[in-house]
Image (cartoon, grey):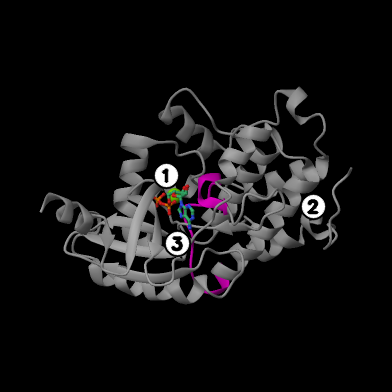
Amino acid sequence: VDNRMTGTATTVPCQYRTGKTLGSGTYAIVKEAVHIKTGKYYACKVINKKLMQGREYMVRNEIAVLKKVSSGHPNIVTLRDYFETAHNLYLVFDLCTGGELFDRICAKGSYFEQDAAQLVRTVMRAVKYIHDCGIVHRDLKPENLLFRTPAEEADIMIADFGLSRVMEEEKLQLLTEICGTPGYMAPEIFKKTGHSKPVDIWAMGVITYFLLCGYTPFDRDTQQEEMEAIIAGDYKFEPAEYWANVSETAKEFVRYCLTIDPNERPTAEQALQHRWLADLGEHFVPDP
Ligand code: ADP
Ligand code: MG
């Protein structure tokens, strides 16, 4: 009986069997899952329903949107399936086996400028697509950018979006109180004056900075200091030795995205027109 109980507990409503944990974030655990009938592997995100009490209808709405939007762009992780039980939501996504951008940056130290620009352009194009669909990601960061395969030149994929609107308050609270870094959050989020599409462009500025030097611009000893630095837009391209091989154009692009006033900040389309991205060839061949 015990064995059967265990088996039941690890079977996502009938059709999937879950395996190892792939990662966990602010409000969910993501596990590898195999579709029993086809033997195909997926990533299954398990979300505790307690986190969305009273707003389940919004979540269902959002999931429908997510499903549609995610299947429409090659650099967005596709939502394939959706289940719920009394306690949990299960979202089944295409599996990315190449890990997080975060880990690749940490392993490399930093990216060559050309490679960074290629990645940023690919992600920015996907952000433009999301924005054109009327959706704001709200949680862009290297932990939410995944590689489709372990290959060096693998496609980069945007994950973890869509539910942020319904989770937002809890998440913001969790983010600032318990877990983690507010490092990618735009100044207007702390000022509570809005968190619309421009927050994603701000996050892209922080990600670009991180790609180029290997550390984040607003990292401070305490979260309070970090928030103050973000609100003041207080960051530098220092220490100089980390920025020696980075062009003025790249720094200009970072500054452009990190415009404090969200109304002055570029849109995704404008960011794509910045010469750091616009002047890249479509078929980049890395230096030998
Ligand atoms: P949270 O909202 O809790 O941050 P995420 O959707 O970001 O949840 O997932 C948490 C982690 O799980 C990710 O940072 C990543 O490491 C892993 N993960 C998420 N989706 C996938 C996927 N489709 N394929 C492989 N790993 C994934
Ligand atoms: Mg995440």
Q: Label 3 belongs to which residue?
A: 42
Can you say whether 59 is above or below 266 in the image?
Answer: below
Q: Which residues are magenta?
A: 131-146
Q: Is mark 2 within 8 Å of ligand 2?
A: no
Residue placed at 61% from the left, 32% from the top? Answer: 215
Q: Secondary structure at mark 1?
A: helix
Q: Is mark 3 within 8 Å of ligand 1?
A: yes
Q: Amino acid at mark 3?
A: Tyr
From the viewer's perspective, is the residue at label 3 or at label 2 nearer? 3
Residue 190: assigned label: 1
174 w.r.t. 196: above or below: above
Q: Quadrant of residue 110?
A: top right
User: What whole-number distance in Å separates the C-alpha atoms at marks 3 and 2?
Assistant: 36 Å
> Mark 1 near mark 2, Cβ–Cβ under 8 Å?
no
Please state which amino acid type lies under the numbered disc 2.
Trp
| Mark toward the start of the polypeptide (3 vs 2) | 3
Residue for point 30% across, 72% down: 60
Q: Secondary structure beneath disc 3?
A: strand
